[in-house]
Image: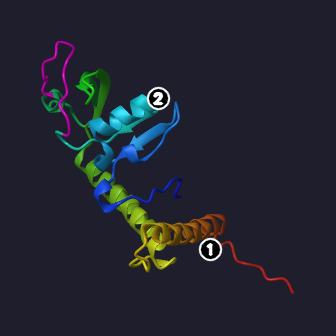
Amino acid sequence: MSGDTFNITKEETGETLCNFTFRRGDPVIADRAYGTLKGMSHCRNLGADYIPRPRTNCFAMYDEKGNKPGIAGRFWGLKSGESSEAAVFVVLPDKSRIPVRICVKRKDKEGCEESRKRLYRWRRQVEIHFKRLKSIPDFRDLPKKNPVASEAWLNGKIMVALLIEAFIAKASFSPGNRIKYQS
């Protein structure tokens, strides 16, 4: 896991895909917090490919006639291991319609439990990653009140964090890969 982009924003800015610049064809895989119509619109306007994992009822979906089709009801009858999809449209803030493909696969109880465990492990890795990025460079209260000086201080700290991250990514600390010292 590694960081690719960071932005220093004011507290009221919030987390949104609109904080980032993408290139045409960039794959943008977004978790729930970023699964919004505004984020989809931003990606579309920049030509990026967008794969969200949206929250339940995060935005309205419509069929080709403009009706709300009740997507969840389509999938209740699936048996364990079966999958299905639905083609719908969403209306972006600029009132344009874009097609969206909803894909669903029903898991059995064991598969659901395994997914929960795997998801917890991944979330834990993400938490550890961010904790390391915050704690090693000693991110605490900004020592400066001047916004320009604060931004310079943060950029320096982030640079240190990224260098440490790059070093850790290259190193292997497993017992099978022992460090050999030369004299």
| CA distance for labels 2 and 1 | 40 Å
Q: Is residue 45 left or right of residue 13?
A: right
Residue pictured at 21% horizontal, 33% vertical: 79
- The image quadrant where one finds the C terminus is bottom right
x and y, in percent, of residue 132 in the image: 47, 73
Which residue is disc 2 drawn over?
A: 47
Residue pictured at 30% horizontal, 37% vertical: 38
Q: Identify which residue, 7 or 54, lies in the foreground.
A: 7
Q: How many marks?
A: 2
Residues shaded magenta: 58-70
Q: Is residue 183 left or right of residue 106?
A: right
What secondary structure is marked by label 1? Answer: loop
The image quadrant of residue 141 is: bottom left
Q: Give the amino acid type for the residue marked by disc 2 in the picture.
A: Gly
x and y, in percent, of residue 167 in the image: 64, 68
Which residue is disc 1 drawn over?
A: 173
Q: Identify which residue, 120 or 109, lies in the foreground.
A: 120
Tell me the chief SS of the magenta region. loop
Residue, far right:
183
What secondary structure is marked by label 2? Answer: loop
x and y, in percent, of residue 123 in the image: 36, 60
Q: Is residue 172 above or below residue 72?
A: below
Q: Identify which residue, 143 or 158, lies in the foreground.
A: 143
The image quadrant of residue 177 is: bottom right
Q: Give the amino acid type for the residue marked by disc 1 in the picture.
A: Phe
Q: Is residue 50 above or below residue 177?
A: above
Q: Is residue 60 magenta?
A: yes
The image quadrant of residue 63 is: top left
Residue pictured at 56% horizontal, 70% vertical: 156
Which mark is nearer the camera, 2 or 1? 2
Q: Which mark is residue 97?
A: none
